[in-house]
Amino acid sequence: MLAVEADRVWKYFGDYPALRGASLQVPQGACMALLGRNGAGKTTMLRILANLSRATKGDVKIFGDGSRSDIVRRKTGYLGHGIGVYDDLSALENLMLFGRLLGVDNPEKAAMEALERVGLERVKDGMAREFSRGMRQRLAVARAFIHQPELLLLDEPFTSLDDRAINVLQSLLKDALSRGSTIVMSTHQIREAMELATNVALLERGKIVHAGPQTPEMLADPGWLYRTYGDGPVAE
Amino acid sequence: MREKAIYILAILAALVMIPNLKTVFMGLPDEAMQGAIYRIIFIHVPAAINAQIFFTVSLVTSILFLVKKNFLWDSISVSCIEVGTMLVLVNLVTGSIWGRNQWGIWWAWDLRMTSQLMCFLLYLGYLLVRPAIAEPTQRASISAFVAIFAYADIPLVLMAIRLPNVRTQHPGPVLETGTMAPEFRAPFGLGVLAVFLICTALILIRQHQETAQREIDSLRRELHSI
Amino acid sequence: MKRGLITALAIAKKDLQTELRTKESINASASFALVILVLFSFAFDLGREELYAISGGMLWLVFSFAGALIVNRSFARELPNDCLDVLIASPAPAWAIFLGKSVAAFLLLFIVELISLPVFGLFYNIHWTDRFGGLLLVMALATWGITVVGTAFSAVTVNIRLRELMLPVLLYPILIPLLIGAMGTTTALLGGEPMFGQAASGEALASLRLLVGFDVIYTSLALYMIEFILIV
């Protein structure tokens, strides 16, 4: 079964197409790295998959379900550019709120477990605004994983994370994959992405120009993908 | 095809309006109580009637946009509301002039003028918010939402200003009570028709301009991305 | 539907929690209300009779200005850290997010009104305590109207330029019928007129009907259409 099936998705902002017939298939249990330059449409695509935005044309099915129902959204975890936690609530309160919104059975227990997982259990009652940047990032990651989503959508998750946060995120992602979850992750940090990725897709100006399993060439030289299928070299 | 329609409408409007104006100014006698100023009614009321027609059209096209997401409906909405707001302004100004002539004051909080002023303010909000939104789909969705909220307020405004405690200094103008003399009815009806034809032509022009502007904006964005 | 209501409650609780911790908008709103009350005293130099005649008008002007400050914060508080995206992506239905925020805004504005009312009575020597029941009813109905339309426009203006300016421009014209009804009934109440029963003039009932009609129409419209604003 396909976790994500995007069929010829078009997204118009006014008359400008950010996505032009982009088709993407992500098998269940895969970790897909969605590569592409700035402005290629990665964030737009992820937002459509996360139900934040509607495709203008084309179909999007998550686990075979094309509706935007709350059942589908309960299975999805989203980590966008912003960290998505409230500054004026404590770490525990934040996670309990999102746990409740995401339909978790025992919000308090799930929140405590999530905090332990990311190493923030000692500051559970600290206000999010008092945390350091790395701690806020770990809290954001805890929030995205609290309901053990079957599909994780991450928009440039490794960007500007500190060491500890990167380790935490990588270990959580590995755990999720071993549990059978599916990951779609857009990224610029090709190296960190390639370590985890089983599949790779390249988005260029609104179109998926290549999608397939990760190959040894890609792992050895991440820029290879851009040169082979894309517009040109990544960096001189 | 559109240009032909616009020309035809304009010509029809001229054919209706010019003889009508001649009748109004030269054919009809001065009214017994008001003197010459009563002729202002031939623009004052048609403006209001047509404004309501176009606001109702904008309500329908706003709902259609939200349902079908086709920008054509959004262009028609904004054109109708712009023209309608202008008509309400014409109504307010002519009403004010008439009031100054008849009652000696530029403004009176009577039922009709007050509800027209509220209408003006409601749609003025729409016109002010629209340029503040950069992204076209968001702009169209928000505009549709505001237009529906504004239209829903009109019956509530009419209810509110009829509440007993709200002061209304003067009774409504001529049309509120009594019937119109027969020789006035034809010029009046033609006046409504003429304004309708002119405004439809204006709406077609404006709608086309809105569509073209949106296309230009998106082409510009596309150009930047290359 | 039940899940939606639970979600709405959770969001209302969150809004109230964060607001009562920082007290940012409640302080600003209450202070603003007090300042306007003082300004009015300089604007008008009236005797007792005339003061009672404008009491409803003054009070509701104060409440609606204070209200604009509160509803402005309603969706704006979701902008830092992109929390709005997380809420929308979650299983929470759009109407539940909206409802929770409206309820929170309603309670916050109601608190500000309950603070302003005694101050108003004090400054202008207006007796309100014996009419408190009727006043409470009018305040509840009209405040709900202000917050439901205000929160809807807060969602509308959250991402656009000049948000603080656009919200009042959109909000006040729509509120005019509501304010007319509220002002009239409040003036009558403070003036000692009975609202119900044999001696009542029927005016108050007509106004109450208007308030309820306004609330029902705009609550339904907002709940139904807010999805088009939040998910583009």
Image (spheres, grey):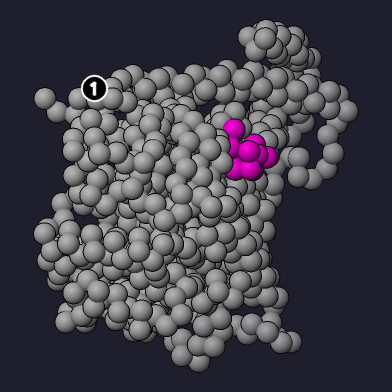
Q: Which residues are magenta?
A: B59-70
Whole-percent x, y for residue A106 in the image: 42, 83
Where does the C terminus of chain B fall, quadrant-wise? top left
In front of the other: B176 or A171:
A171
Q: Quadrant of residue A181?
A: bottom left
The residue depicted at 61 percent of the width and 20 percent of the height is B204
In front of the other: C49 or A24:
A24
The residue depicted at 75 percent of the width and 23 percent of the height is B193
Where does the N terminus of chain B fall, quadrant-wise? top right
- The residue type indicated by label 1 comes to Gly
Asked if A20 appears above or below C147 in the picture, the reply is above
Whole-percent x, y for residue C28 in the image: 27, 68
Asked if B76 appears above or below C103 in the picture, the reply is above
Tell me: B3 left or right of B194: left
Asked if A193 appears above or below C112 in the picture, the reply is above
Whole-percent x, y for residue B186 in the image: 84, 23
In front of the other: C25 or B187:
C25
Tell me: B142 left or right of C211: left
Whole-percent x, y for residue C124 in the image: 36, 79
User: Looking at the image, can residue C167 be seen?
Assistant: no
In front of the other: B72 or A13:
A13
The residue depicted at 35 percent of the width and 60 percent of the height is A177
